[in-house]
Image (cartoon, coloured by chain):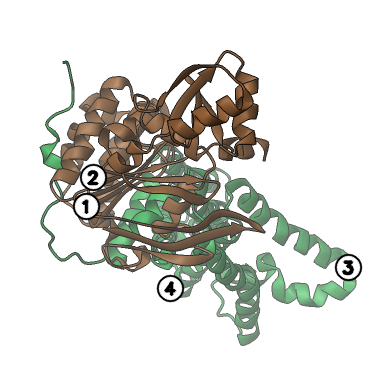
Chain colours: A green, B brown
């Protein structure tokens, strides 16, 4: 009898030692690893970095030399990165269902809200990482600028960094919220990009909607975050209201759906 | 130890699993048998907390699955070998599970070795795995946390004969050392060879359960006539349910009753004997007679 299988004795059930449940830190580590351990995930992160690098390069080539400052390298890179971060959030949540790994994940951690929390923390860490990457690339751009005759000034308001963090963390969470709600990658991605756009267009076209649109269109409410001016109370209010609708609501409904959904 | 009490799952008005109760003791392999769509997988998903039951409850090692602090260390679960991320390597899939459970990374290599996935296979992406390799990977995942209970849905599916033989030995050994195994299959021979107890399900309901040898003892009667249609009419007239088998009609009654029914109808028999050789297959056919046709029609 030829067999590649070794003796089966090694699988005997062991005497039991008390086992602890995996900590949230551990689960977050697992979810961070899941972001990078497939080709698709790695390339998404690489693309995000490349886009930020391209934006800085374009600034170096085309921007007025006086405008080649740390701040003007940093801010423009936020927007394209902020477009891709939600995709990361969506895929982190939905790939469990499209690849059917939810079967393993939720068999190992039946308290699904813990997995979801770990995923949200993991994508927030990724968003923070993207801000750090944007800062690093802006620094490289500034160095190159000062060597090639650009302004190369390093001045940057701390509030701008804070705004950038808010911007990127909320966009990744909005993506994750749509993923949780729809649980299907193409549906969630299309929904995420289409709904706010449709809303924005409607807000422009339909006059009675223009008022509410000031408070509900995230592309409008989040706009002040790109500047270093301190935000007014009303501006913060608009951000909070729009995030309640596009982030908190889908997060809550999506969590409810994910906890109850049959895994098969 | 697995205890299932009155588990029921309804999808709309249709019950997929209907009032199913059984238990699996340490030291035994329980074969969970039934035709496709009988409710085996739904029952197993309910045991594992992946599907919420409409009624009833299930416990593993005395606790509902969802209340196990670190389930992977208590129960090894393999419900679908294809449910792996196609873009991860086999080793990476196990590494993620090992991290989740808080296991030493060496366990990953040990379990890959145990199921016969060599270093080359472990580095390949699951996309490139055959079904047999996925089953081995799934089995490695189930065994990773050195659990005391194994819940396996059709684990022999896609394995070659040598692989099936190997797995049979592995499960038998696991049980002999005090483990509890619940194993579903439609590969009847496989279950007959390894199980101590049987739970047979058809149309969502348990149709038979008990000790394998006891169940096989009442295997029914094999009867054959040149005029098969007349024989079937005769059995119908006598209210005896008959199922087709490779050797003739399999009747859930003793030989005397079958012979009398044939004589009453004037049907000449070519063969009449207690079913024994076919064992489980005939039991299975008898018990699920009608159920599988109902399933096919639905």
Q: Quadrant of the N terminus of chain A?
A: top left
Cα distance, mark 3 to mark 2? 61 Å
Pair 4/2: label in front: 2
Residue A211 location in percent, x, y? Answer: 80, 77
Report how far apart the C-alphas of labels 1 and 3 lie in the structure.
62 Å
Q: Which residue is mark 1?
A: B147
Q: Is residue B98 left or right of residue B11?
A: left
Tell me, yes or no, whether dots 3 and 2 are on the same chain: no
Residue A72's label in the rendered image is none
- Identify the residue shown where x is 43% and y is 34%: B220
Q: Which of marks 4 and 3 precedes in the sequence? A: 4
What residue did someone put label 3 on?
A206
Answer with the quarter of the image where residue A115 lies. Answer: bottom left
Q: Which residue is labeled 4 in the image?
A: A158
- The chain holding disc 1 is B
Q: Nearer the viewer, mark 3 or mark 2?
A: 2
**Disc 3 or disc 4, which is closer to the eye?**
3
The answer for how far apart the CA atoms under marks 4 and 2 are is 51 Å
Badge 3 crowding class, 10 Å Cα cut-off, few under 14, some 14 to 19, many 20 or more, is few
Cα distance between the residues tagged 4 and 1: 52 Å
Name the one closer to the observer, A134 or B213: B213
Q: Residue at x 74, y 74 (%)?
A: A214
């Amino acid at each position: 009898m030829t067999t590649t299988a070794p003796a089966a004795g090694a699988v005997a059930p062991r005497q039991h030692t008390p086992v602890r449940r995996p900590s949230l830190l551990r689960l977050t580590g697992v979810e961070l690893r899941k972001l990078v351990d497939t080709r698709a995930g790695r390339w998404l992160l690489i693309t995000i970095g490349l886009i930020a690098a391209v934006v800085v390069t374009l600034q170096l080539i085309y921007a007025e030399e006086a405008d080649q400052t740390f701040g003007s390298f940093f801010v423009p890179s936020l927007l394209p990165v902020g477009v891709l971060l939600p995709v990361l959030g969506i895929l982190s949540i939905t790939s469990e269902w499209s690849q059917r790994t939810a079967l393993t994940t939720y068999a190992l951690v039946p308290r699904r809200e813990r997995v979801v929390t770990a995923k949200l923390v993991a994508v927030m860490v990724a968003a923070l990482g993207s801000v750090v990457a944007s800062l690093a690339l802006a620094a490289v751009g500034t160095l190159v600028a000062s060597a090639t005759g650009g302004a190369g000034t390093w001045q940057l308001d701390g509030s701008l960094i804070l705004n950038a963090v808010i911007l990127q963390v909320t966009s990744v969470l909005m993506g994750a919220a749509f993923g949780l709600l729809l649980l299907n990658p193409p549906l969630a991605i299309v929904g995420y990009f289409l709904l706010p756009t449709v809303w924005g267009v409607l807000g422009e076209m339909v006059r009675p909607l223009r008022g509410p649109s000031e408070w509900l269109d995230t592309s409008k409410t989040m706009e002040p975050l790109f500047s270093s001016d301190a935000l007014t109370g009303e501006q913060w209010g608009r951000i909070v209201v729009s995030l309640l609708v596009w982030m908190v609501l889908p997060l809550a409904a999506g969590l409810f759906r994910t906890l109850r959904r049959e895994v098969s | 130890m697995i205890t299932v009490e009155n588990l029921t799952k309804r999808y709309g008005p249709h019950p997929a699993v209907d009032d199913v109760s059984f238990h699996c003791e340490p030291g035994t392999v329980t074969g969970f048998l039934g035709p496709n769509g009988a409710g085996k997988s739904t029952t197993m998903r309910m045991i594992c907390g992946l599907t919420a039951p409409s009624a009833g409850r299930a416990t593993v090692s005395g606790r509902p699955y969802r209340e196990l602090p670190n389930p992977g260390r208590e129960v090894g679960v393999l419900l679908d070998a294809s449910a792996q991320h196609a873009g991860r390597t086999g080793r990476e899939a196990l590494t993620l599970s090992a991290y989740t459970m808080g296991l030493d990374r060496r366990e990953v290599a040990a379990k890959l070795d145990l199921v016969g996935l060599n270093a080359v296979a472990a580095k390949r992406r699951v996309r490139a795995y055959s079904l047999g390799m996925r089953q081995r990977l799934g089995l490695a995942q189930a065994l990773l946390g050195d659990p005391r209970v194994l819940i396996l849905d059709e684990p022999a599916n896609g394995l070659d004969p040598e692989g099936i033989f190997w797995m049979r030995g592995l499960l038998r050994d696991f049980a002999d050392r005090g483990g509890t195994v619940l194993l579903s299959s439609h590969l009847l021979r496989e279950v007959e060879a390894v199980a101590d107890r049987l739970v047979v399900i058809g149309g969502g309901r348990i149709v038979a359960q008990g000790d394998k040898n006891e169940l096989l003892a009442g295997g029914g009667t094999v009867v054959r006539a040149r005029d098969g249609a007349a024989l079937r009419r005769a059995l119908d007239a006598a209210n005896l349910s008959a199922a087709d088998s490779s050797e003739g009609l399999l009747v859930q009654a003793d030989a005397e009753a079958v012979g009398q029914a044939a004589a009453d109808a004037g049907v000449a028999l070519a063969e009449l004997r207690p079913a024994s050789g076919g064992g489980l297959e005939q039991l299975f056919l008898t018990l699920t007679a009608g159920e599988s046709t109902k399933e096919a029609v639905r």
